[in-house]
Every structure is written in C-alpha cells, then in structure tokens.
Amino acid sequence: MESRQLIDRRHLDFVLDEVLGVDDLCRYARFAEHSRETFGAALSLAQQIALDKFLPHNRKSDLNEPHMVDGKVVLIAEIGEAVAAFCEAGFSAVLADAGRGGMQLPFVVAAAADGMFCSANAATIAYPTLARAAANLLEVYASEEQKRLYMQPILEGRYFGTMCLSEPQAGSSLADLKTTASPRDDGSYAISGAKMWISAGDHELGENIVHLVLARIEGAPAGVRGISLFIVPRWRVNADGSRGARNDVTLAGLNHKMGQRGSVNTFLKFGESGDCAGYLVGTAHQGLAQMFHMMNEERIGVGLSAIQQAAIGYQYSLDYARERRQGRHPDQKDPSTPALALIEHADVRRMLLQQKCYVEGGQMLAYDAALLVDRQHDPDDSVRRDSAALLELLTPIVKAWLSDYALRANDLAIQIFGGYGYTRDYPVEQCYRDNRINPIHEGTNGIQALDLLGRKALMHDGAALKILAARIAASCAEAAAIAELAPLSRQLGQALVLVRDTTQAVAARLGQGEVRLALANAGHYLHLLGHVVVAWGWLRMAVTAQRALAAGNADSAFYQGKVQACRHFFAAELPQVELAAKLVASAEASAYDMRDSWF
Amino acid sequence: MKILVGYKRVVDYNVRIQVKPDGSGVVTEGVKLSANPFDEIALEEALRLREKGIATDVVVATIGPADCQAHLRNGLAMGANRAIHVVTSEAIQPLTAARTLLKLIEKEQPDLVILGKQAIDDDCNQTGQMLAALWNRPQATFASKVEISGSTAKVTREVDAGLETIEIDLPAVITTDLRLNEPRFTKLPDIMKAKSKPLESIPLESLGVESGDSLKTTAYAAPPKRSKGVMVKDVAELVALLKTKGLV
C-alpha cells in the first residue's frame, strides 16, 4: 500500500480548513505571521518526515525492544535518526515563541502535525514530545536562568526530558508519593527516592535528560498539598551551559511492555549515593498544580495519539478489504462465480464504517478541543473564559472516549484482516498493542470519568455544560435548515435533553450526600456525554459536506462519505446513550452493591 | 554564479491516479499535489552548489495556475533565494515549456539551468533537451553526479550501458536523475522566512511565447486490468502455450 495514503490528509484538511476554519486564528496577534499556507506547509513537512523517517522502523522497534548494556539503554539506530530529523526540522520548538527560535504555531495545528507522527510510530515520537512537554512546563514556571540552562537546549533538540510522577507504591494516587527533597546550602535540594513508569527515562539520544520530578520537601504537609516540582538533570549543567558531572540518577531497570516497545520505559532511582541535585521550579508545594497546568494539553495529546493509531489501522483494513477476495453474497450459491472483495460484504462495510465514525469523529473532537487552547489568545475576555471552561469539560472526554473507541476501531481492523490480522505478519495487531496503553496512562479512564462527573460537569453550577449545550443547540439549528439533516438535528436535540436530565439527577443525589453511589456509574456518564459531543462533531461535518454537495463540488464521493458516516453514527451509536443515561440517572447499583466475598 | 531551477507541481507520487468518468483527464480535486521529485533533486543540487560557494543565487521557476504560489513557497522554504511564477491556467506541453524557460533565461542570464529529467505526470523527458537546443548551449541529461570547476561542468550520466562522464561548457542545461542526491527536509523556521522572499508573477501571455502545443488529447483511460494467469506444469507446456499464442 502506498504509505502516503496511510495518513488521510484530505480529511485532516477538511476538518481544519472547512469545518473548524482554523485560519481564523491568524487574526490573533500571536499567530499574525501565519496563514493557511504556513499551516499547510508545516503539516506537509510533518507528514513527509513521519512517513519517511518514523513509519519504516515501526515494526523493527517493536521486535527489537530497548535493552540495557553496562547500565545504558540501547535503542535501534533508526529511532535516533527519526528523532534527529524531527528536531532538526524544528518540531521541538513548534509551539515556542519566535523569539526563542520557535515556529509559534497554534496548538491545534501542532497537534495535527503530532498526530501524523503518532500514526506512523507512536513509540518513537514519545521521545521528542515528552521533551517538549517538559519545555512547555518550564516556559510557564521556571526562572529565566533555569530556562536558559534546561529549556532552551530542549527547544534546540539537544536535551530531552521526562515527567517523573509515579512511584512503585503511588501510581494514580499521587498523594502517597514518598520521594523527598532536602535543602542544601547552595540553594539546591538533595533528591532521594524512586520513580516508576518513566518513559524515555534513560537513553543516549541527546546530550542530557531533564527529569521533572515531583517530591516532598522535608517537613512539607501530607497529601497532594506537600508536593513540589524539581528539575533533576541526568548530567549536571555548569553556569555557562556546558555539561558538568553525572548527577546521582540511576537506571534501576526497564519495564517490558505490551506495546509501544520502542519507547523505553524505566525505573529510576534518585540519590542512591546521597548526591542527587535537584532545583526547585517556582514556589514550594505547588508541584501538582504546576504539573496539572500542562495536563489538559497532555490529555488531549493522549486522546489524539490514540485516535491517530486507530486511523492508521482503519486505513490498513480499508485497503485490505478492497484487495482481499473471499466468499459470496448470502443469496449467491454458485461457487463458479468469482469471490467478492471483502468490502462487498455488508458486515465488513459495517466494520469499516464503524471505524470511520470513531476515527474521523474522534479526530474532529480532538481538534475542536485543541482549538479551544488557542482561543486563550482571543482578545475578547468572554471568548477566553468560555473556551477555558469548555476545554476543562471536554478534556476528560477527549482523553477517555477517544482512547476507548480507538481501541474498538483497532479491534475491528484486526477482525477485517481475519486470521492474518492475528499474526505478526500484518500491522494491525501492533496498532492494538501500541494503543492499549492510552486508556491507562495520564490518568486512567476511570479517573477521567470521575473528573468529568464529579467536578467538570457540575462545576460553577454546571456553567461549562451550559456553554456546551448552547453550542450544540446552535449547530442543531443550522442543521435543521438542511432537509437531509433535519431529522438528525432533532435526534441530537433530544439527546441533549437526556444529558441535562441525567446531570440534574446526579446533582440531586450528590446534594443528598450520596457521593459514592452518585458517582458509581461515572463511566457510563462519560460514554453518554462522549457520544453526544462526537455526534455533534459529525453533525457539523455533515452540514459542511452537505453544503459542498449542494454547491456542486466535484469531490462528491468524499462529501457523501461524510454524510453517510454521520447517518450511521446517529443510527447505530447515538441511541446507545439512552441506556447509559438510564444507568446513571437511576444510580443502577448492581456493581456498586456487589461484595468482595460474592466474587 | 546564478542557477535557474525548474520546479513543476504535479500530483503527488503516492496518489493512486484516477481517471475522470468522462475520460477528460485525471482527478485532481482533493488530491495531494507536490513538487515533481526530479525537480526537488534539481533544487537540492543547486542548493548544494550554493553551500559549496560555487553558486550565489538559486532561482526556482514554475509554469502553472495561480494557486502554484504555495508550491513555490515550498521551494523557497527549502532554500531557493527567489521564485518566478509564470502564470497560466492551461496545461502546457514540453516545447511551450522550453520556449517559456528560454524567456526566463534571457531575463535572468543564469550560468546553469537544472531541470528534472522528466515530470512524473506526463513523463515526457523532453523539456531539458529542447531548452538546450533553443538556447544553443550544451546539455548533460540524466545526471547522477555534477562537479563544477570554473566555466565547465563534469557530469556523470546514467545511460543504458551504465555510466558516462562528459565535460560541458557553461552556461548549460543539466537534467537530474534519481541518484544525484537525496533532497533535504525543509525546516519549520524556513517556512516562515520563505514568506518574505521575493516571488515574481509573470502572466504567460506577457512573455510572447509562441505555443508549441501540437499534441491533442482525445481521451484518458485507465490501463486495462491484468487478466488472470494460468499455471503450467512444466517447461514443455509453457513453450507449447507460448507457441500457440504466437509469442515465440
């Protein structure tokens, strides 16, 4: 299969240009130097590097896991070459200010560029994007001196970075973390502790690795309020920026994962010899808030990465379904007739269309949320405020719905390949394995559901949900004016009422103090609201497509595909919200009441 | 030294070409367009000559519709100093292209013209040769190695028998083969810099080029599907079959 078609650029351009109109961002001062042309050129460059440098070693790095030799991590050479191409092209600094050598691209365009690398090779892209996330955090909270020593080299692609949160005994539960920081005479801290699940924790890709470590300063309050953020470099850095002595950070072991095997996952020990230097970022005890400042964007990144891996699985299975010939129609018994292409079978088309619905609808949601990040540059106060509230609300959905449904899409892709899909001779089993981490990391999907129902949906008297409802209603009104879409518009309007009633039922139960029971079905609530926002995205895509068709656009098959997928989502997926709503609103308690001893 | 580089926009080499249902052409709506790969090699070679201090000025030129500007900006982002856009909404044939490029040569007075040996849309492989003849200057086609010293170029050519090395006087036309070099990736900051580089638009009709388009396209059609093969049990059967089909 031609590799370039593994990335559906036409759909990406459709969502960004035709549906979301991201070139509207160019009226903001921050993006004034940009145009649709520069966005397009940046995306084309990402596509080219993703396909030429990242995709070709995706399988090889799966088969050749990182390993340790003399305490050092050994990676296949292609990972280094791909990361170097990424950095040399300037993608490390894609969001950074022009004054720091950055491209100053909008978040939504940078996310779309990242997405192509995720499709091509989710494991390798982890190295430079983790580094960039560390740089983004330093940009907000670090001192100028710290930026010069630790952030600028990341932007230049010389240093890499990690996020060190989890410990062996404290994964999702950060309140229990034990790593300590003791003040030293020179103003730095001595860090002591162990960190688990650290992606890209050790490697030789760059000159240095900047670990961002959460730790407790001696005597700090217990729980999350006593956590501070530290810069802990692998190699100490002298005042002139040159590399100093090795810091006391040791690679204690590697974790052997189901997928994304090319991205090394480490167990690190800090201060085993009592000499691990750490440097406080910002003020003490603010570590968690600082880390979470970046979490919205990170979680959009997780959702997008998941759906991009679903997207490539969809393309693989679509291509296979067009090539592979098997069987005949149920009413066609004559064995002398030629076998049909898989795509001729109704059930295979269903599996393809279901993938298309999840993938393209999921991408739409991810880009829509990413665009809200850029709205923080809008001159209008109320736009900034509403966008921020909406982003808060949508973030757990982007993270959890996309990572859940991306896996379902990969599952369908394997099914279309049949027995071949279950073998390692075809790429779809790796898509699934690589993608399986996404419902787990950066806050499990269970935690996302609690965040959505326990905080976001009800915060400020449900203000964010009201903003969302108003926007969905506006889209429904637009669709209602188009005859082909009017029934879908009504259906989404009804689903919106369901969301409102269900949320109110939960609020009432919480008001009665039944917190645990009220939140017990939070996962179903996320499914409910997730399906409603994805249906909203599909309706907007269908409106744009229907208008293009009415205008006689020559690319009619493309637009018809959008309208048809929208119809399918509304027919086969959206009705599922009724069950979810019922379970949540009635606080259905069969799982909640189940007891340990009954299992 | 100034180098003029031909930089044509074509349907991307990875797109599965589809013929329009009415046979009037191939589908280009919603299809990714990009630089002709041979022309990217031409530009890369020119940039390398500039980096070696041999050339000072690299000008990319294209002949195409108004929306070719973004395409030329890509060439500028890759490193060209300037761009010239000869604007026409009509698809033109090699002789017209060569006559148009000659006008640009008269205007720019380059010391070297580097073109792709062919464009992957029509695969003509004619423009470079025609241009050299019209310009009355030497040509070195299918180049896989180029060395410039003073006013001559030593060019290794890929020919049927293997490699052939010739020396030509400059100014001259060189056309590139695939193995000449591997084009670089653009850098993001250069995309921004390209916005302020000079891009000159010239309407084709203002150049006074006499059209050389003499081929008429009657219809486009997809090549016939390969029919199913047959298995033969031995060489004897194969030979017999070839004979009955009149193939040997």
Image: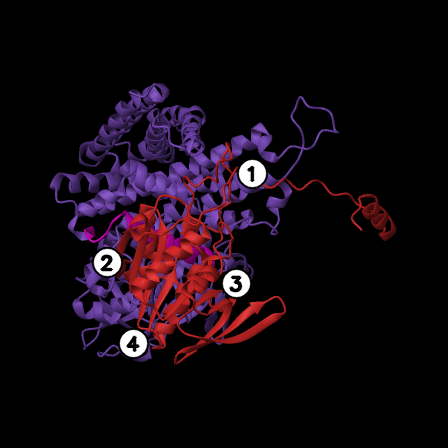
Chain colours: A purple, B red
Marks 3 and 2, how far apart at CA: 33 Å
Q: Nearer the viewer, residue A89 or B42?
A: B42
Disc 3: host chain: A
Residue topped by disc 3: A65
Residue topped by disc 1: B221
**Horizontal and vertical percent for residue A138?**
23, 62
Q: Nearer the viewer, residue A9 or A241?
A: A9
Disc 3 marks a residue whose amino acid type is: Glu
Q: Are marks 4 and 1 in contact (CB under 8 Å)?
A: no
Residue topped by disc 2: A287
Disc 4 marks a residue whose amino acid type is: Arg
* Quarter holding residue A252: bottom left
**Horizontal and vertical percent for residue A64?**
54, 63
Mark 3 burial class by Cα count in 10 Å: few <14, some 14-19, many 20+: some
Q: Is residue A171 visible?
A: no
Residue topped by disc 4: A236
Question: What's the magenta region?
Answer: A31-53
Disc 2 marks a residue whose amino acid type is: Gly
Marks 1 and 2, how far apart at CA: 65 Å
Q: Is residue A33 magenta?
A: yes
Marks 3 and 4, how far apart at CA: 29 Å
Mark 4 burial class by Cα count in 10 Å: few <14, some 14-19, many 20+: many
Q: Are marks 3 and 2 in contact (CB under 8 Å)?
A: no
